[in-house]
Image (cartoon, rainbow, N blue to C red):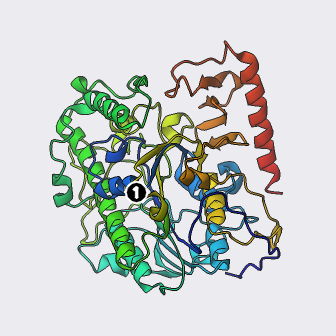
Amino acid sequence: MKKITLTIALLFLCTATTLAAKPNVVLIIADDIGFSDFGCFGGEIKTPALDALAKDGVRMTQFYSENMCWVTRASLLTGVYHKTSLQKGHLHSRCVTLAEALRENGYATRMSGKWHLNGPKNLPVDRGFEHWYGIDGGAASFFAPAGLYRDREKVAHEFKNDPDYYITNAITETAVTYVKETPKEKPLFLYVAYTAAHWPLHAFDKDIAEYKGAFAKGWDVLRKERLERMIKLGIVAPDTPLSPRDPNAPAWEDAENKEWQQRRMEVYAAQISVMDRGVGKIIQTLKSEGRYENTLFLFMVDNGGCHVEYPPSRKGYYLPQKTRTGEPMKPGNLPTIMPGPENTYQSYGYGWANLSNTPLRLFKRYDHEGGVRTPAIFAYPKKTAGENRIDRNVVHAIDVMPTFLEAISAKALPDKLPTGKRIAFDGESFLGVLDKETKHRKKSLFFHHSNGKAIRDGDWKLVSSGSKEKDWELYNLAKDPCELNNLAKEKSELASELAKKWTQWSERQKKRTK
């Protein structure tokens, strides 16, 4: 990577929040996990490490991602919106990445995990990370992951030669090594991008066994029980309703192959628990290295739970033809095959994704709340230890980069890059959350990817999963957080005004590529 020369020597001014000089920055992102899956957000899944981090920080209950993996990752690493039709899976060329900016400010920059931002000369080590371990694509076997790298070297031999290989554990171990190897006097930026719990449903038997029978009540009862816990925890308001079961999911009492259905959720839960153990190991290493208290943490998820039913006919670069021992693969959501082993390739489907996103509607790929409202934990133990606080500020992945740059009083970014004029941030810093500030967004939030498009302006949200103007739906999220009462006809003028704003934003996005 050519080192970007910063041409402006101004500093970002800090808010009332006081952070020690050069705090470590740890950004951890999980993959395809619903709003309520973690224990500290109301789920049955055991997440003691995340629960402990939440007790030392702030659970953010109105944190927005994009509705699919790569778009969120591009946004959080640049502070800038990305659109699928324009960028085709890689970063804007006229953006500075968070890694590039922090490296320029004296940080060791390390990444372990999923990149999913491919393009010409666009590996992590081309965009500011000094070292990287992980996959370049969006999905992979947990036992034999396609596109596995260390820096620029492909390292398939690592999983081929290790019968105990599991990518979640490998991501964790590499992250732990990075922490230990970074000189004590040098601040660390560590980006950990787990592939859990993206399909395929892969886990070791011993981890799956921890959840045997845990989901026997089925998604209907468990959704109700989750909502009750969420209300008790303060994640949602006491009057929050439960959205109707998705029409693509049968009533649990009518569901066929219940043992197989339960197994799907058991494997999914096991994937999350293994990831949580990894988070705990990283945090313990930071503590043993004397870095924990002076570390700014953000744990987030790239989009809501994924409803996709994996068909036997689906193929892809990520799907091996055989296992490491030469067994033929058995892909597809086939009730005659229990998920979990290396030779399977399954997903958990509509009913369980509906549970994951409790109490919200819809899923990954949609810009309704179930697709883009995701759990997040923000912590700075030196300041927030023991606070165990809930925060309801509206925050988006585009806000991550400006927040971290403000936190370290970073040098200002250059106006011009070798590729042209730098695209200004779309995001706004939420550093004040550490000081219990109520953040009033200066800008509307915009979404457009896959099956979704939306604008959130204050409490109002205009959203659609179609391409026609008549498909717009309007909701007041303060009164209707689950998007159950469409006011598009009743408030047609407001709907038209917001639709116009969204169209103008969309046109501005197109001009960015010129």
Q: Nearer the viewer, residue 238 or 29?
A: 238
Q: Residue beneath label 1, please? A: 56
Q: Position of residue 119 (x, y in %)?
A: 64, 67
**Quarter the N terminus occupies:** bottom right
Question: Dot 1: few (<14), some (14–19), or many (≥20) neighbours within 10 Å?
Answer: many
Query: Which residue does the image show at 30% across and 49% down from the upper left?
Result: 268
Taking the spot 20% from the left edge, 32% from the top edge, the residue there is: 217
Relative depth, front residue between 502 and 395: 395
- Indicate whether 135 appears above or below 439: below
Q: Report x, y in % for residue 160.
A: 31, 77
Q: Name the foreground residue: 318 vs 243.
A: 243
Q: Can residue 369 be seen here? A: yes
Would you place residue 238 above or below residue 64 in this image? above
Q: Is residue 330 visible?
A: no
Residue 414, located in which quarter of the rendered image? Answer: bottom right
Q: Is residue 144 left or right of residue 12?
A: left
Left of 486 or right of it: where is 194? Answer: left
In the picture provided, is 86 more to the left or to the right than 251? right
How many labels were placed on the picture?
1
Residue 31, image quadrant: bottom left
Quarter in which the C terminus is drawn: bottom right
Give coordinates of residue 44: x percent, y percent.
27, 43
Label 1: state its secondary structure. loop
Among the 4 quarters of the image, the one containing residue 359? top left
Compared with 323, 447 (above or below) is above
Q: Position of residue 400 (x, y in %)?
A: 60, 57
Name the residue rendered at 43%, 78% in the picture: 179
Q: Nearer the viewer, residue 135 or 125?
A: 125
